Image (cartoon, grey):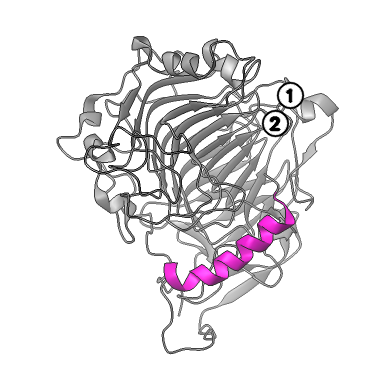
Amino acid sequence: MKKTFMNQLFKTTFIIALSALVFVSCKDKDEEPEPDKTAEITEVTGSITEDVTWTADKIWKVKGFVRVQDGATLTIEPGTLIIGDRASKGTLIVQMGGKIIADGTKDKPIVMTSERAPGFREPGDWGGLVICGRARNNVTEATGQPTELEGGYGAFHGGTNDDDNSGILRYVRIEYAGVPINPNEEVNSLTMGSVGKGTVIEYVMCSYGLDDAFEWFGGTVDGKYLIAYRCLDDDLDVDQGYSGRVQFALVIRGAMLADQSGSNGFEVDNNGSGSDAQPYTSGVFANVTIIGPKADRETPISLQYQHAAQLRRNSRISIYNTFMTGFPNGLYIDDQRVGSGQAFLDNHLQIRNVWLAGVDNWGGNGYGSAGTIFGEGTAADGKQHPNNPRGVALKTDDGFPGGHDAMVTKFNETSARNKLLNTWQEAGIDPSLFENGVPTVTLSATSPMLTAAKWDNTPKADSFFEKVPFIGAVGTEDWTAGWAEWNCHIVKYYE
């Protein structure tokens, strides 16, 4: 989503000031060291107009906008390292009709990262990966012409082929992406514009991105095993009529890493204006874990944190068997009357088997504002913070039938099987999820979430979804092991 100039200025200043606190610094060094030139680095510029392969025996440096054009396929071998040129805002763009086959393995993931040395890497060191397809979106539907992605960098998307195939993205890590292409307009770590369901997106990790981790602008592509790790803006940003399916998505935030525009786990819109344009944003997400920045009431977090899930602007997403915690608000439907609020009451927008957990002694019912240290004794001490935070909230409006109470009643329906916990400890997740370093992502043996998933009340969860017994992204088997990297700020990728 677009930001104001002051938002961008704040973000840039904030990142520079914060980097010494968040990332491992090169102590006793005043300047960034030159990389060792013994590695063979191949620079890539301009357009790719015929089939090419990037091999693992070289390092591939993306300079400026590198575009895989219509009819061409870029194949990237397992274990290949790709670095983005900082000065030229290196960005890899797969245009409509182009393909990327980045099919890594658990032992040999493909890594796209900053060119800078350990200790000097920052969010926004390069652009990121953009994939454009010819599936539907609700902006193209209205105009009849492909839609340009925000930023004005010539990445068009949209059409009528929901089965469109843009290739394979499997066992891929994208780190330190999100450079501003224009003032206030950043590229996301992974941008998917009208990507069709013929495309494979599995085992993808986006870390320390300056903007959103994953953003879907329309399209029908499915995804499994996604990780958003310590990115700044939103983690799962869904817009312009996205109607695909996602299962097993893990979000972990950093306490002070947030965007001036307001950071959320989910941010969901039908489109920028909230119009009734179709296809509706109606993606189905199941088995998501969102770990917010707030581990306990003493943990200072950025003032820009907002909601674990902000659903707004006439969107009709469905979220099943999901766990969210650590945000000032849990579920916030920021749209009323004929918008997302009404869609929720009418069962177009479905929240089923979702567990929301507060933070012990933080604000009212375990939810506060970013700076809140409030209440003693019991979880909320029977008090409510002046900002009136809630685990479940609706944008207030006298014209909405039933108002906030109708929203809470719907959330608490017996058939929905949603649950509010006072503290995240009750869910049986590991405290290391809030800490730096390698987290324990599996549930404890005594976690009530291990067997709490329900599938009989999830009508939009078709055969794509594995009917696992647990709530959240990970049960007892750690699917992040072997390919995910939790300490990319200190990894020396090449000699």
Give the Cα distance between marks 2 and 1.
7 Å
x, y (%) of residue 437?
32, 61
Q: Say if mark 2 contacts mark 1, CB within 8 Å.
A: yes
Q: Quadrant of residue 140?
A: top right
Q: Position of residue 91 (x, y in %)?
A: 67, 59
Task: Say left or right for 30 vs 336.
Answer: left
Amino acid residing under circle 2: Asn
User: Toward the viewer: 225 or 213?
Assistant: 213
Q: Residue 237: give x, y in percent of width and height.
A: 57, 39
- Quadrant of the image containing the C terminus: bottom left
Q: Residues within 10 Å of mark 2 (few under 14, many from 20)?
A: many
Quick check: 56 above or below 446? below
Q: Residues within 10 Å of mark 1 (few under 14, many from 20)?
A: some
Q: Nearer the viewer, residue 211 or 100?
A: 211
Q: Main secondary structure of the magenta part?
A: helix
The residue at 53%/84% (across/down) is 32
Whether residue 144 sits left or right of residue 468 in the image: it is right
Q: Is residue 6 magenta?
A: yes
Residue farthest toward the left in the current orientation of the protein: 446
Residue 275: image tag: 1
Q: Nearer the viewer, residue 315 or 223?
A: 315
Q: Which residues are magenta?
A: 3-22
Q: Tell me the number on the disc at residue 271.
A: 2
Nearer the observer, 33 or 428: 428
Looking at the picture, which amino acid does disc 1 mark? Ser
The quadrant where residue 221 appears:
top right
